[in-house]
Structure formats: structure tokens, C-alpha cells
Image (cartoon, rainbow, N blue to C red):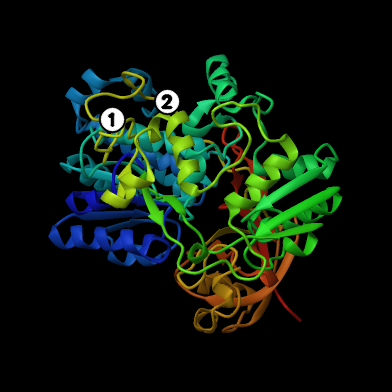
Amino acid sequence: MTNSVPEFEETDCFLITGSNTTEAHPLIATRVMRAQRRGARVIVVDPRDVQIAKIADLHLQQRPGTDVAWLNGMMHVIIKEELFDQEFVETRTEGFEELKAAVADSTPERVEEISGIPAADLVKAARSYARAERGAILYAMGITQHTTGVDNVVSCANLAMLTGNVGKPGTGVNPLRGQNNVQGACDLGGLPNVYSGYQSVTSTSVQAKFEEAWGSTSPTRVGMTVTEMTEAAHQGSLRALYVLGENPMVSDPDINHVRQALAACEFLVVQDIFPTETVELADVVLPGVTFAEKDGTYTGTDRRVQRVRKAIEPLGDSRSDWEILGDLGQRMAGNGSGAPFGGWAYTSPSAIMDEIAALTPIYGGVSYDRLEETGDVQWPVPTADHPGTPYLHRGKFSRGLGHFTAVAFQEPAEAASDEYPLTLTTGRIMFHYHTGSMTRRSEKLDREVPEGYVEISPEDADRLGLGKSERVRVVSRRGEIETRAWITRRVPPGIVFIPFHFSEAAANVLTNPALDPVAKIPEYKVAAVRVEKVA
């Protein structure tokens, strides 16, 4: 996120897209609603009538996978009506003429043909966002989980820069992370192409820095993403896999293919806090601990580093993740070479943070002593006396000038057809979290929503002859599931929605593993399916 969650109370206009904010991020949604009571406008762009849309001043329902089209359409209107921030564009950006040319034919009428958003509504949204003193874009995985996910995010950045909504409070481009430490995992090297702090593994100077600190480094080449590992395991080129706190047998696309890949893997290790569908396939299971049994830090969606403190001792044979990984590291790599941080012989999470600070410039001023005193700090925080950074890009961008990237609309990888006439999109609901490994063990939460379902419009239900709560079969090119039909106007005709939390009716049996060519993220949000009555 370029900005901070508390700043949203200062925002004048929210553009929320691909995020069911009230259900998936309720605390952030309360900030939005407080700002709205103060007079802020809320624009929601989502194919479904999600809960946040019910409070929206304007709800645009696009055809899934057409986000670049409507974003380009908004920019077309803003440029045509000269609502863009001319001073910001001239002094802080480059590539404006290329962007202008790229969106020239994205008229509201043309966007309506592509996306289904009424031209008049698109114009209203563009004017509201552009005229706001402080406009903030909030998005989640409804924007990123597409074969054009990178294009979607770049288009959001284009729109924010075009209107000068970057580098000041209450504005920005703000992804809402799906789990509580996704940001921290990315920050500290949980990506295949970077060391901690987004330092490239292919940079010779960065390689030298880490080799000096550790005594050696792993191979300095870009590794594989999750979906690429699955494919490599299926092909036999990846022979061992270590899964930590993840449940790909529910969360990854095309689960039948995932099952084959994990079964083909010679050695599968799973480290988790509860038995999961992936644990059932493991050769070795390492019991980790819950948040209540460990010390450490989380880095939240707005780059906020916060301490967590152990409330109880680990239960049974479970151990903290850092202890398990440290012991494995020592056994695999020996006891180090005398390098400052070689050997894996960590004594505490605080000592690990000291290493992070020494090697990671954006975390350079973070320490447990400081967090004990201040409670939290937002990176970049390069030194111990730096106050932290509530919002990014104040005065200038890290690259100098912000770069507009012209993006052309592309259709999703899979379209509805005669055989598969409906478009499936997936997501979360309020009462369950991710693959349900925790929330479905809660009696109260499971009582609220005990089983999966498919949302289907009354028009499509009538066409199929479906009655209330009737059991149906949902079929895609990759597999099929049985579940219950929820006939609702939350989805328009032609679109169905399935929450992905339920392993016995796993939405990801159906989803398309087609990847964004840059980020390698699968297209969870668009898949062609058909719905059949169960005899």
C-alpha cells in the first residue's frame, strides 16, 4: 500500500474494486464508512452485489476480466474533460502522451460494449474520482487474480498518477492483503526473485552483500512461483517440496492437477498447525504453532510492523516456525563459517530481527526494543531514529518520475461458450477464512455457514429449472463439484460465484490455472462452467 489505513478517514472519494471490503477486511471498511459519514463518496466496481456495494454511492458491475477496459475508460473521460492534475502530470510523471493515445478509443460507449458498465455511470465515476481532493484506490484479489493481473494493477497506478492521487495522505494505490502477514512474507524474501527488502537475487552487488553476511548463498537465479512448482512436480523435475502454512489442495487452481503433482513428488513436507487436505499427502508433518504460542512480528497491509507476544507455551510437540527452520538449516548447512550471520544458530526472534535490520534497508531501523516502546512502525524506516513512513512517494518517486504505462485490454484466458455458458468467479465470505483449516473448526462459525454453495441468478435458475437450495453439479473443463444452489440477485445473469473455503465442494477444482505472464498468478476470478441439476 502506498498509504495507511488510518488515513482513509481523510479520503474524499474511494474507488474500491475487486474487494468485498466489509466481509474480507471489516476493520478497514469501518474507516471507509466513517469517511462516508463525513461526506466521502464511495464507488464500488465489482461483478457481484457484494456487501460493500450496498453502501456505495455508485456501483458499477463489470463483466469479469474487463478491468483494464473500464479503467482505460475512466482515464479517457478524465483526459477528454481535462479533469487530470496537469501540474502533477507535467512535473512528476513521464509517458503521458503514450497513455493518452492508448486510451483514446476507450470511449464510455465502447467500454459499455466490452464490460457491460453503462456509459453514463462510467462518466459519473470518472468525474467523482477525478474531482476529489483526496482519492484512494482500494483493491484486492479481484484485481490481481487474472491473466491480466499486472495490467490491472498498472492501470490503477496510471489512474492515480493521472489525477495526482499519489504522495499525499488519504490517497494512493492500496492493495488489501489476503492474509495477516502476506506483506511481511514478501518483504522478507518470500518471493522467488528477491532477497529481503526486494533486493534482486541476480544483482552481483546484492549477492556479494549476502555472501559476506551469511558465508554463502543459495543459487543466485530466479526461482519458481507456487504454480510453477506444481507444474514442475507434475513433470518430475521438482522432486521435493516443503509446504509451510499453506493448503494448496484447497487454495490452488485445478485441484485435480495439484493432487497429481503432489502425489508425483518424491518427498513432501508439510508444516502447519492443524491437519489439512495437503497434510494427508505428506511424507513428513512438522507441527508449527499458532499466533498465541509464539513471539515475532507481523507486517500488515499498510507496511506496519507490529509485535506479537507469546500468550501460552507451545502445545504438545509443536514448535515455533523459526526454531524448526533454524534446526533444519543447521543440519543441512552446518554451523556456519564465522560470517556475521552464518550458521542458523538463532537464539530468539529478536536476534532474527537484528539480522533483518542489518541486511534489509527498508527495515534498517526496526528492532524489538523500538517496537516495545512505540508499538509499531511503518517501513521504509532506514535508521533507528527515522520516524517511519505513513505514505510513500512524497515529493518524488523512487525511480524519479512516475512512469505511465500504456495498457491495452485483453480478454480473459477462458470465455463462456455453448458447452460452458456461465462465468464462475470465486472469493471469500465473512464467516470463513482462506481454506477453512481454522474457521471450520469453530462451532459457531461453522454453524453460520456449514457448507459450500453456488450463487446463481434467478434468471439462470429459472432457465435450469432450479428450486431453492437444490443440489447442483458445477462443471468446468478441469473437473466438477456438487453443492447447493443459492438463488440470489447478488450475481447478475450469466455469472455464478462459489466461495473457496469448502474442501468438499472446492471451487478450485473448477478454476483455470492459466497464469499472468509476469506475476504468474492464476486466473481464479474467471472460468467457464455449466450448472446441472443433480438427479
Residues 243 and 428: in front is 243
Q: Is residue 355 left or right of residue 382?
A: right
Q: Is residue 228 left or right of residue 149?
A: right
- Disc 1: CA contacts within 10 A as few (<14), some (14-19) or many (>=20): some
Q: Residue at x 72, y 35 (%)?
A: 334
Residue at numbered disc 2: 406
Amino acid bearing label 2: Ala
Residues 9 and 406: in front is 9
Residues 311 and 258: in front is 311
Q: Quadrant of the N terminus?
A: top left
Q: Residue furthest left?
A: 38
Q: Position of residue 498 (x, y in %)?
A: 58, 66
Q: Position of residue 198 (x, y in %)?
A: 49, 30
Residues 98 and 384: in front is 384
* Mark count: 2
Amino acid bearing label 1: His
| Mark 1–mark 2 distance (CA, rounded to whole Å) | 21 Å
Q: Residue at x 32, y 42 (%)?
A: 378
Residue at numbered disc 1: 393
Q: Quadrant of the C terminus?
A: bottom right
Q: Is residue 199 above or below residue 477?
A: above
The answer to whether residue 327 of the structure is visible from this angle is yes
Dividing the picture into quadrants, the one containing residue 464 is bottom right
Between marks 1 and 2 in the image, the one whose residue lies nearer the viewer: 1
Dividing the picture into quadrants, the one containing residue 32 is bottom left
State the SS at label 1.
loop
Q: Position of residue 97 (x, y in %)?
A: 33, 18
